[in-house]
């Protein structure tokens, strides 16, 4: 069984190590790097990161396991559909406002004539971001988590699945999923993607990889965005990269500005290169 945590609303979150390494390990560290609990592994796993303040009993573990399994099952179904359609799927994640939609608009401007691109736009409310991405020739499917999904602060596999019948997957080369702006739980839900790209903005502070290691660790690529603001901030890029390296050694990094276009050719090249074989 995977490890997970539970929000106060009762929704469990799959541990990202399951995404990376499969299932069955019950050891290791919590989000904050501390070990929690001793004794019965199931009990301990359920307690890890559980912020609800409820006591965790066997029944609760059963319910949470069932929900966890359901996300995995649907993620597998999504992946099977993506594979059958031969569409490459990238899950784009970041804190609110790091630049996902701006980057996507620039990406569509550059690539829409060369690749057939679809976007699943995840937002709690509003079609503001989806509207910003209209007019580039991409297929856009909006998922409002406030519309039938409890206003969740992340996308999970069933939410992504709900968007698939609004896209012509077989006609797409690339599907980008703009996740809900959130530095924490989007990383914990596998949605059937091939790769995860994370945007970090230099306005967020150098210490964020240490404070929020889960997303930084689960990313296949980290984009350091808003690099155009470097002259105006006292941001220490070397320190940030050292902190990133401490939580995810060797992760590919691109320094970009979605505003000026700096580095976006490299990002587009990354999107076009074949997905590396898993291993
Ligand atoms: N200076 C500068 N501003 C940027 C850059 N990229 C994005 N912004 C600005 O940052 C703000 C947020 O950008 P968005 O693209 O909406 O960010 P987002 O990650 O999609 O935000 P949410 O969807 O709300 O999580 C906007 O005002 C953008 O114009 C950049 O490279 N440089
Ligand atoms: Mg956005
Ligand atoms: Zn969430």
Image (cartoon, rainbow, N blue to C red):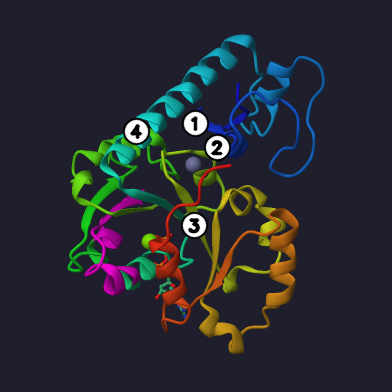
For this orientation, the residue located farthest to the right is: 38
Residue at horizontal 54%, vertical 59%?
221
- Image spot of residue 224 (x, y percent): 56, 70
User: Quarter of the image holding residue 54?
Assistant: top right
Q: Of marks 3 and 1, which one's residue comes earlier in the chain?
A: 1
How far apart, in angstroms, are the residues tagged by discs 3 and 4? 21 Å
Q: Are marks 2 and 4 in contact (CB under 8 Å)?
A: no
Residue placed under numbered mark 1 in the picture: 9
Q: Are marks 3 and 2 in contact (CB under 8 Å)?
A: no
- Image spot of residue 78 (x, y percent): 34, 35
How far apart, in angstroms, are the residues tagged by discs 3 and 2? 14 Å
User: Quarter of the image holding residue 75?
Assistant: top left
Reply above or below: 152 against 66.
below
In the rendered image, the quadrant that contains the N terminus is top right
How far apart, in angstroms, are the residues tagged by discs 1 and 2? 23 Å
Q: Is residue 112 magenta?
A: yes
Label drawn at residue 80: 4
Image quadrant of ligand 2? bottom left
The mark closer to the camera, 3 or 4, is 4
**Which class describes the residues within 10 Å of circle 1: few (<14), some (14-19), or many (20+)?**
few
Residue at horizontal 34%, vertical 33%?
80
Q: Which residues are magenta?
A: 107-130
Res 54 visible: yes
Q: Of marks 3 and 2, which one's residue comes earlier in the chain?
A: 2
How far apart, in angstroms, are the residues tagged by discs 4 and 1? 30 Å
- Image spot of residue 90 (x, y percent): 41, 52
How far apart, in angstroms, are the residues tagged by discs 2 and 4? 16 Å
Q: Of marks 4 and 1, which one's residue comes earlier in the chain?
A: 1
Q: Is residue 21 left or right of residue 32?
A: left
């Amino acid at each position: 069984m995977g490890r997970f945590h539970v929000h106060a609303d009762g929704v469990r979150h799959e541990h990202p190590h399951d995404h990376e390494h499969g299932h069955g390990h019950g050891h290791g560290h919590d989000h904050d790097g501390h070990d929690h609990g001793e004794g019965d592994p199931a009990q301990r796993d359920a307690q890890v990161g559980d912020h609800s303040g409820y006591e965790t009993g066997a029944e609760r573990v059963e319910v949470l396991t069932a929900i966890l399994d359901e996300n995995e099952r649907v993620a597998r179904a999504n992946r099977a559909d993506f594979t059958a359609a031969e569409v490459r799927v990238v899950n784009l994640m970041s804190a609110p406002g790091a630049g996902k939609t701006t980057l996507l608009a620039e990406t569509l401007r550059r690539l829409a004539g060369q690749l057939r691109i679809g976007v699943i736009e995840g937002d709690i409310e509003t079609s503001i971001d989806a509207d910003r991405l209209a007019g580039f020739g991409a297929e856009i499917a909006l998922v409002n988590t406030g519309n039938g999904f409890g206003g969740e602060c992340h996308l999970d596999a069933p939410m992504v699945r709900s968007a698939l019948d609004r896209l012509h997957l077989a006609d797409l080369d690339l599907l980008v999923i703009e996740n809900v702006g959130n530095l924490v739980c989007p990383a914990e839900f596998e949605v059937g993607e091939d790769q995860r790209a994370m945007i970090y903005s230099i306005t967020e502070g150098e210490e964020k990889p240490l404070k929020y290691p889960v997303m930084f660790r689960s990313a296949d690529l980290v984009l350091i965005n808003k690099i155009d603001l470097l002259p105006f901030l006292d941001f220490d890029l070397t320190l940030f990269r050292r902190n990133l390296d401490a939580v995810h050694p060797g992760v590919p990094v691109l320094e970009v500005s979605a505003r000026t276009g700096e580095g976006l050719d490299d990002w587009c090249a990354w999107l076009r290169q074949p997905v590396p074989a898993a291993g």
